[in-house]
Amino acid sequence: MGQEESVLVMQKEVDPARIQELCMSFMKECPSGALHLHEFKRILGIQNASEEESVYIETIFRSFDTNKDNAIDFMEYVAALHLMLRGKLEDRLKWSFKVYDQDGNGRLDRQEVTRIIKIIYKIKSKNKNIDMMPAEICDRIFQLIDENDDGQISLAEFMEGAQKDPWLLDMLALDVNASAWVSQNWSKTT
Ligand SMILES: [Ca+2]
Ligand SMILES: [Ca+2]
Ligand SMILES: [Ca+2]
């Protein structure tokens, strides 16, 4: 896994100067020091997001709001940027698991997986054809990673599965797609 991981990280690596720049834009956009959901959307340049994109952004917003006060403060913002743009694969997978785990019980059931897959399916299928439906994708994910067949995906099953199979990694490592998408969208606002 070591080699694959370094390739992936290198491809997605973002210049530290770019991160500095993004931190400056937080200060500018957000002099109060706390970023709320609507400002988060504005800073990403996606006021006119589709419903799916909005749900996805909101889910991501919540996952970055570590202390759950409905705002992202500067430290949370910096942590989020580092994770999304420079984080290790392992950290990004742990974060993705949290995004999937809607009720936060440490396990993913079929409903939670389907919910996120449906969203990323809509976003991804704008750019390329995917030859499977969300329900099939979800079935395949469970087939491949639910090792003990209890209908729930544990963090260990999630981490192992994602690093064993490139297709799974593409579906499960949410931030990999998000970082490309953030860098794309950012240029529109600055
Ligand atoms: Ca917060
Ligand atoms: Ca859960
Ligand atoms: Ca299981």
Image: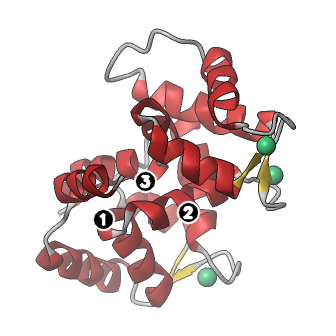
Quadrant showing the C terminus: bottom left
Residue 88 percent across, percent down from the top left: 37, 67
Q: Residue at x 63, y 65 (%)?
A: 62
Q: Is residue 32 above or below residue 114?
A: below
Mark with earlier residue (3, 1): 1
Depth check: 187 or 65 in front? 65
Looking at the image, what colour scheme do you see?
secondary structure
Report the residue marked by disc 3.
Answer: 175
124 relative position to 159: left or right: left
Q: Is residue 88 above or below residue 5?
A: below
Report the amino acid beneath label 2.
Answer: Trp
Q: Is residue 79 above or below residue 122?
A: below
Report the residue marked by disc 2.
Answer: 95
> Few, some or many C-alpha atoms within 10 Å of disc 2 (few <14, some 14-19, many ≥20)?
many
Mark 2 in CB contact with mark 3 (< 8 angstroms): yes
Report the residue marked by disc 1.
Answer: 85
120 relative position to 155: left or right: left
> Few, some or many C-alpha atoms within 10 Å of disc 3 (few <14, some 14-19, many ≥20)?
many
